[in-house]
Structures are given as structure tokens and as C-alpha cells.
Amino acid sequence: MPDRPGRPDQNRRDQTRAGDTPRKPRQKRRGPAGAGPTGAGPTGSPGSPKRKANPLANPGRRVSKPPRPAQSTERSDSPAAKPKAAPKSDRKADRKPDQKPDQNRAKPAPKARGSKYPASQSKSKPKPAKQPKPAQPAPAQSAPAEPAPVAPMADGTPQGLFFAAPPGLEPALEAEARALGFADVMAEPGGVAANGDWSEVWRANLMLRGAGRVLVRLGSFRAMHVAQLDKRARRFPWELYLRPDVPIKVEATCKRSKIYHAGAAVQRVETAITETLGVPIDAEATLRLMIRIEDDLCTVSLDSSGEPLHKRGYKEFVGKAAMRESMAALFLRDCGFDGREPLLDPMCGSGTFPLEAASIAAGLLPGATRRFAFEDLAGFDAEAYAAFRRRITPETAEPDPGFRAYGSDRDAGAIRGASANAERAGLSHLCQFTQHSVSDLQRPEGPPGLVMINPPYGGRIGNKKMLYALYAALGRKLTEDFSGWRVGIVTTDVSLIRPMGIKFPPPGPPVAHGGLKVRLWQAQL
């Protein structure tokens, strides 16, 4: 019976079974040119048997190799060929008791770990066996406990102090803090760091002239997300510092941390304080709590000053674009003023420079007439603070005989306000204010001193184009009548300094003032 079209030869299939070799997958072969489909004869007739391609018919055509002949399962070293291997389950049963496995058969060499070659042929060197680690005792707890916040000691001793200053005036504030004997003083961006207890906090608020605020570091802890911030804020010992009847204001800053939303940080801390201690939250509160999150480290600080320290308590009249007393004190220190020489300000306004110079000469404490936020903290001892103030307040002493503060301005209202400020400060006997223009400026009698000026810049007061003539007239007057005096001018632009005709060395660093950048220019006349 002829084969069906497309099927292989039946005899070949029988031979493959007789040879007992695994059947290989069929490979498609193409016949010579003109042949029909696979399994057909050279003419394409379906009944023709499949033929092998003749390599000589078309030498350039690639022809697949013929199938390998079936190999016999007979071993060369066995006396007789075995027609078929016995099943694995029956081999032990057919083996005689005295018959042993073939000893001549070589066992395959073990392969190297991680390689397809045997260990003897592996190119990589075998790794030495790892020594077992000594057993370590298991921790007492299954899960590590959360680290406790870095809180102050049981008595609430501060972890550190920070005296805020305008950027650019940190060296002057550092020199003042060292002169007053504060410990571990070091200038940092935006202020000066120091150490001390609560008595040093009191002293810094009372005696520092150049500091804008005195911040007290209460403690710190790690916080990777707001839930962790809320949990650890509830564990913080707020009762050491805050009172349930005194409202507070919470502020936060985030920098290079996973907690990047300052508003969310403020909300979590406020909720923790309110629910644990019952402290009310008020946006207008004078007691300010500051949270700084930097590199996932949350530092808790407290503003011990309340209102900024430049508010001395006696200056009710404030002129246009007036300079803060704290900044004026640092500029006076940079000019070398020590209260033993006269001071003149031909554009005094509300009298900031003359009043601050008179306060330095008289030895008055800059914070002697005002109140501070630390007086509302928990555990504040009013009697101890009163005794401390009496101890550090200098006795009434006459200033140096050579000191006198002179101020002048062409605005009559400014002169009246400056005179009233001097009366409230108790410094009217050391200050003299007169109304006249720069062209009518006269040299005071006595030894030379310091001319300190904060003239208009043309930004908030005056027209800059009209100020060139004013600066030129001031320069001529100082050059002609104030030989031997020193001059210090705070202004914004070098183009305003050039018309004065005075050779100034390079100025000091830029300092932020009223939205502008000002510099201190000094010269010897």
C-alpha cells in the first residue's frame, strides 16, 4: 500500500524503532531546483518517496547534513550486546548477589561552583571556605526601641545658645560676645553660637547690643516623616519650658530633609503640644517656638527675647528708613568706637547713632528698660532674675569727659523726635540735636572723633540723581573742616561715594538693610 502524501517512509520509521535510539526532530529539506514540496518526488507528484539532495547537482547550494545512523546500544567492552536497557526499578532485582557494579566506569568529575567546567579544568581559583561567625547573643527585645530625643537635662538646662545677627556682621557680634565673656563663642552664618545656662540667657538679652534675638536650643531628634515627627514631638518634655496658660507661636523650616513641607511640620508640632500640655496656639503670641529640620534632624529652639532686641524700649519716634539700633551698634564697633571720643551725625534722623553712642559711653544695659519672653516660661524665678539684674547693672558713673554726641538734620520734625527719644532714655545731657543742612555743618570744639553717617541711598528716600550733589557737598565739608577725624558712611552704591572726593579703602561685606544691600565705608580724614 503506497504511503500517504507528506508522511515519511514507513521502513525508515521501523528501522529507527529497531535501533532503539531517541527520535530526532525532523528537519525541513529542500530538494534541487524544480522539485516539488517536501515529501514529493522530483516532479512534485505526491506519491513519490522523499529523496536526499545530491550535493554534486548544485555545488554552491548549502545542503543539510544527512541524519546520523542509529547507534547500537552494545558496549564495546561487554561480551554481548544488550538489546534494551532494563528499567531502573528492575536493575537491582536482576543483579545477582555476588555481582558488583562496574568498577571500571569512571565517575564524572565534580564541577566547580558557578562554572560549567569540572573543578580540575576551571580557570577561576576556588574560593576559600568561609569561616562560621561566632554566635552573638540575641537582643533582649525583638524590635529595637526608638531612640529617645536629645532633650535637656531634668532641670531644663539649655543645649546651646544662638545670637542672631544680620549676615555680614557676624564677626562684629562675635567680638562683642567674646568681650562680654560668653563661653564657646563661634561665628556662624546668621549669628554667633555659644553655650551657657539660663543665667547666660538672661545676660545675653540684657547686655548684647548687636544681637537681634537670643535663641535657646532645647533639644533635637530624628524625624524621617510627619508621623514620626508627631510621635516624637509628643514625647518631648514641653512641660519643662511651656506653661498651659501662655500662648505660643510655632514656626518651622525644612532643608535637605524627607519632611519638606514646613506647614505640615508646624501642624504636627502644634497638635502634639496642645494635646499633651494644653498650650494654646496664637499667631500673635510673643513666645515663639522654632522647629528647624535639616538632614532629617529636628532641632527645637525657643526665642527667649520676644520682640527683637533692637527695640530698646525708649525710642518711640522712628524716622523714615531708620536703621536698627543693633545694626548701628555693630557698625560703631567696626569703626572702633569705644565711647571715649565725640560722635557726629550730620543726617541723624531719629537719632539712632547719637543715642546708641551715648548709651555705650554711659555704660547702660541695652535691655535694661524692656521685658523679655523668657519671663513667661515655666520655672522662671522672678526673684532670682531681679537679683541678677541688680548684680550686673553698672553703678552710675560719669562718661568720659571727651565724649559728646552731636546730631543734626534739616528736618525740624526729626530733631524734635530725636530730642524726645533722648529724654526717655535719660541721655539728653550727653546728646545735642540741632536743625541745619549739610552745607552749614560746623566742627565741634574739642578733640577729633568719629563722623558716622547713614545718608539716603535713593532707594526709599530721595532721588538718586539728586543725591550726587548732596554727597559731593558732604565730602567737601568733611575734607575742609574735619581734618584728623575718622568717617564712616553706610550706603549702597560706590557711585555715591566717588563724588565725595575722599579716598576710601575697600568697604566691608554687604549687609541686608530695608530690602537693600549696604556696606560700611571708612576713611581717615
Image (cartoon, rainbow, N blue to C red):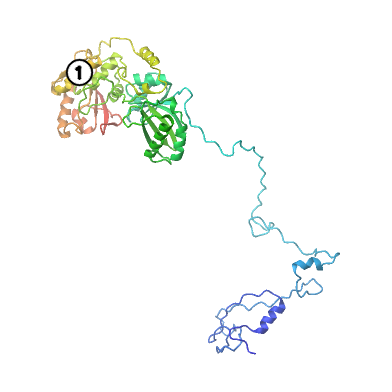
Q: Position of residue 494 (x, y in %)?
A: 23, 32
Q: Quadrant of the N terminus?
A: bottom right
Q: Nearer the viewer, residue 127 or 524?
A: 127
Please state if 64 lies on the left or on the right of 523 as rendered.
Answer: right
Q: Where is residue 234 in the image (x, y as percent from the top left)?
A: 45, 33
Which residue has dot 1 on it? 420
Q: In this view, does 440 lie above or below 464?
A: above
Q: In this view, does 123 lie above or below 500?
A: below
Q: Where is residue 117 in the image (x, y as percent from the top left)?
A: 66, 60
Q: Quadrant of the C terminus?
A: top left
Amino acid of disc 1: Ala
Categorize mark 1 by other alpha carbons within 10 Å: few (<14), some (14-19), many (20+).
Answer: some
In the image as oriented, which residue stretches furthest toward the right? Answer: 98
Residue drawn where x is 29% and y is 25% of the image: 327
Please state if 420 lies on the left or on the right of 507 as rendered.
Answer: left
Q: Nearer the viewer, residue 488 or 264?
A: 264
Q: Which of 274 and 24 is in front in this view?
A: 274
At mark 1, the secondary structure is helix
Give the quarter of the image for residue 209: top left
Residue drawn where x is 19% and y is 18% of the image: 419
Give the quarter of the image for residue 292: top left
User: Is residue 227 among the parts visible in the rendering?
Assistant: yes
Q: Position of residue 507 (x, y in %)?
A: 28, 29
